[in-house]
Amino acid sequence: PTCRSARALGLRMLLSLLYTLGVALAPLPLRRSRTALPRMCDQSSLSQPAQADAADAADALALHRRLKLRSEVEDEFGRALKEGLEVCAHSLRLYGPARVVTSFNGGKDAVAILHLMRAALAAHSEAAGGPRERLRVIFFEQRDEFPEVDAFVRDAVERYDLELCTYSDGFAAGLESCIAEHASAAFVLGTREGDPNGSGQGAFEPSSTWMPPFMRVNPVLRWSYAHVWQLLRGFALPFCSLYEEGYTSLGKQSDTEPNPALRLPDGSYRPAWLLDDGALERAGRSAKGGKAGGGGGGGE
């Protein structure tokens, strides 16, 4: 009996020791506080955009320096470029970055004003010494949009860290919504004097009476067709691939074709920038095509 008791006692001690060792050696349960995981996710999600913002701000500022340098050249394009940069800078100074919206429908003129505004905003932020603000752009969706245009717009929004506002209920209603949501006061447009609604406008032009009240800002109003391509190709700025296929003015699919003035004998087309006569820019557009007269368009 004494031996059995000793053995039983020893067994209990052994089991107790094994239990203690088992608890000590087993992995501790992972204790997650309620704030630990969100904090980690917040840091990760904030770090990537911050790096993108810094990279884009540096790129936009470098672009501004290059544009300024080219604008000092005393030729026709240099003067047009200088005026465009000044108009963009004045819009930011007068209304502030938060109340200025850039129209961006993916057309060549819209690409021109996008980069003028990117550059002007970078210089404005640097001079103000404050945080870099994202450029707000507005895009009006339409059912008959070219898929290449839509894809290009989405790519540009991501590439340049733009704040995109999209509306599908028409120009007037979309502008009214944007104004109500963001207290927008000025819209930067790609309107040029040769456009259907460009005649008689100035660099700063109040909206038409049938539109909500805002200021139209026209930095490329006095630019020619050739000036637009001097900017885009001279500074290696990406543009929609349709321009490589002979399109010179983009509207909807139903009213836009490659420009017949660029057609080659084999049926292919030369790229848009090889159009010799800028007066034929809209030769591929039907009569019903055109920019919105009140301020929603400006891209072609």
Image (spheres, helix red, strand yellow):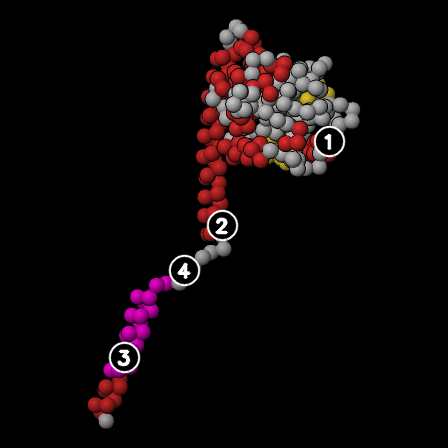
Between discs 3 and 2, the one toward the N terminus: 3
| Residue 73 visible in the picture | yes
Neighbour tally class for label 4: few under 14, some 14-19, many 20 plus, Cα within 10 Å: few
Look at 46% across and 39% down and name the residue there.
48
Neighbour tally class for label 1: few under 14, some 14-19, many 20 plus, Cα within 10 Å: some
* Disc 3 + disc 2, Cβ < 8 Å: no
Give the label on residue 30, or none. Answer: 4
Q: Give the range drawn in magenta.
A: 10-28
Q: Which one is in front, 48 or 19? A: 48
Give the label on residue 38, or none. Answer: 2
> Is residue 23 shown in magenta?
yes
Measured as percent of width and height from the top left, residue 39 is found at 48, 48
Q: Quadrant of the N terminus?
A: bottom left
* Disc 1 + disc 4, Cβ < 8 Å: no
Measured as percent of width and height from the top left, residue 123 is found at 52, 21
Say whether residue 71 is left or right of residue 165.
Answer: left
Q: Is the magenta stretch mostly helix, strand or loop?
A: helix
Q: What element carries label 4?
A: loop
Look at 46% across and 25% down and name the residue there.
59
Between discs 3 and 4, the one toward the N terminus: 3
Q: Distance between the residues labelled 2 and 1?
A: 41 Å
Measured as percent of width and height from the top left, residue 211 is found at 75, 27
Q: Which of marks 3 and 1 is in front?
A: 1
User: What residue is disc 1 on?
Assistant: 172
Q: Which of marks 2 and 1 is in front?
A: 1
Q: Distance between the residues labelled 1 and 4?
A: 56 Å
Q: How far apart are marks 2 and 4 (CA)?
A: 16 Å
Between discs 2 and 4, the one toward the N terminus: 4
Farthest residue in the bottom direction? Answer: 1
Residue type at mark 2 is: Pro
